[in-house]
Amino acid sequence: MRTLGIIGGMGPLATHDFYRKVIERTPAADDPQHIAVVMVADTQIPLRIPAWEGRGPSPLPALIRAAQHCVNAGATVLAMPCNTAHFWFDEMVAALAPDVRFLHIAEEAVRALPSGQQTAPRVALCGTHVTVAMQLYPQAAQRLGLAVDWLLPDPPTQALITQAIAAVKGGNVPAAAQAFARAADTLAVQGAELLMLGCTELPVIAPHLSSPLPLLDATDALAQACVTVCMGG
Amino acid sequence: MRTLGIIGGMGPLATHDFYRKVIERTPAADDPQHIAVVMVADTQIPLRIPAWEGRGPSPLPALIRAAQHCVNAGATVLAMPCNTAHFWFDEMVAALAPDVRFLHIAEEAVRALPSGQQTAPRVALCGTHVTVAMQLYPQAAQRLGLAVDWLLPDPPTQALITQAIAAVKGGNVPAAAQAFARAADTLAVQGAELLMLGCTELPVIAPHLSSPLPLLDATDALAQACVTVCMGG
């Protein structure tokens, strides 16, 4: 069994949500059957959105340091439950030893999309405006050769999603659920068939949502992939 | 702000529950206001109960290694959300640098008991039979000079508590809640005024319990103490 390293703290509730999904998706009846986990939740990692917008320091050195701490403590599989931080994914991989397997959240999420339909599914991407702008999900689908008809939120809808994410980070789940529900309604009207929860803060509010559309939780897809790889799959 | 190191994985759900309590007890509106956390949840740490009973290898080397990984990644405050493992607490402290502050779960729980009453509260100790037998809580109260009238479970009640703990480790929360509720009823009849949840698996089922008595959650007391110390209190 391989040890999983979690590069977290972006934010803490999202990390906590991811860790729970790893535990729940592991077939285990006692402690030793569970996956060993090392987590570095460095809440002082420079903020990703200001960095991407050129308004703040790069998080890359802190991200590499967190990954390295995980590896030093025995992790050989890595995951980072923060979509926006994946902007620095390739540079992180380049800084790590080649035997470390770093799973990409958008690739695992796209792999989990329903397949076998005649037409590509129309998927609304819900994430930070940076995750949307940097094409994290469309590029992941392209790398994997999967056809997806992406619906990117218009500015008012994006504003609601941004508001929901900020409310989760501040611990206000009811406010977050309310803002996200309004965004989901608009995306449904615009023809989305499925909502991709492409920000790790969003699944925190999923139990409080009555969405008109099915949700695909990227955090959950990443957790399942981590369990499979760590268990030797 | 000091970085918190969590020596976890005993079991994973208990660790997860502790981490949530740290997050919830931190006054924070955004990621950087949260405490930085390093967690080593090594599920392969030799089992504590067989070791204590002389039927298996000592977990001490693995516990020290986990603590050291936390320190190497920047932690200067440590907590171990597993009561039974505190049997090796003193030996772990002796192996760590003197500037590392390792908080003791039973001491923090006993400090959180209601005070100011004329007579010592009658507190039923709910934990593994090892936690009960090694006098973890009575000794902690004694060190702190606090008077507590401890009610230790009789063998049939202890068997129910043991059953509840095993069910949580196996992920079966309803079975755990049912067994624990029967133990709580007996302890109430025997004169307990408060149930000390002295095993970190037990708070996982607290939301599913209708206990006839107030509960004191040692995990929560430890989390609050960690937040206070890490925030500079």
Image (cartoon, coloured by chain):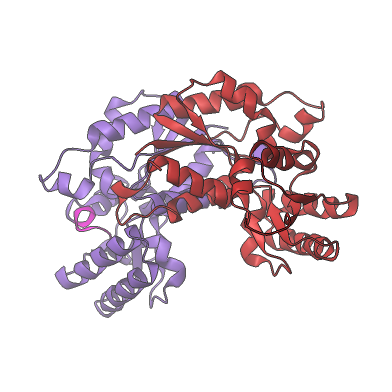
Chain colours: A purple, B red
Query: Along the line of sight, which residue is nearer the eye, A107 or B153?
Result: B153
Query: What segment is highlighted magenta in the picture?
Result: A126-132
Which quarter of the image is occupied by the C terminus of chain B?
top left
With respect to residue B52, does A140 lie above or below? below
Compared across the picture, whether A64 is left or right of B172 comes to left
Q: Where is residue B45 in the image (x, y as percent from the top left)?
A: 64, 30
Compared across the picture, whether A18 is left or right of B215 comes to left
With respect to residue B189, does B220 lie above or below? above
Q: Where is residue B86 in the image (x, y as percent from the top left)?
A: 66, 34
User: Residue B106 appears in which quarter of the rendering?
Assistant: top right
In reply to whether residue B8 is colored magenta, the answer given is no
In reply to whether residue A128 is colored magenta, the answer given is yes
Which quarter of the image is occupied by the N terminus of chain B?
top left
Residue at left offset 39%, top offset 75%? A211
Residue B208 visible? The answer is: yes
Q: Where is residue B22 in the image (x, y as percent from the top left)?
A: 47, 49
Compared across the picture, whether A4 is left or right of B202 comes to left
Compared across the picture, whether A226 is left or right of B31 comes to right
With respect to residue A141, does A149 lie above or below? below
Residue A116 visible? The answer is: no
Q: Outermost residue toward the front?
A: B118
Q: Where is residue A25 in the image (x, y as percent from the top left)?
A: 56, 51
Query: Along the line of sight, which residue is nearer the eye, A147 or A56?
Result: A56
Query: Along the line of sight, which residue is nearer the eye, A99 or A11?
Result: A11
Query: Along the line of sight, which residue is nearer the eye, A114 or A207?
Result: A207
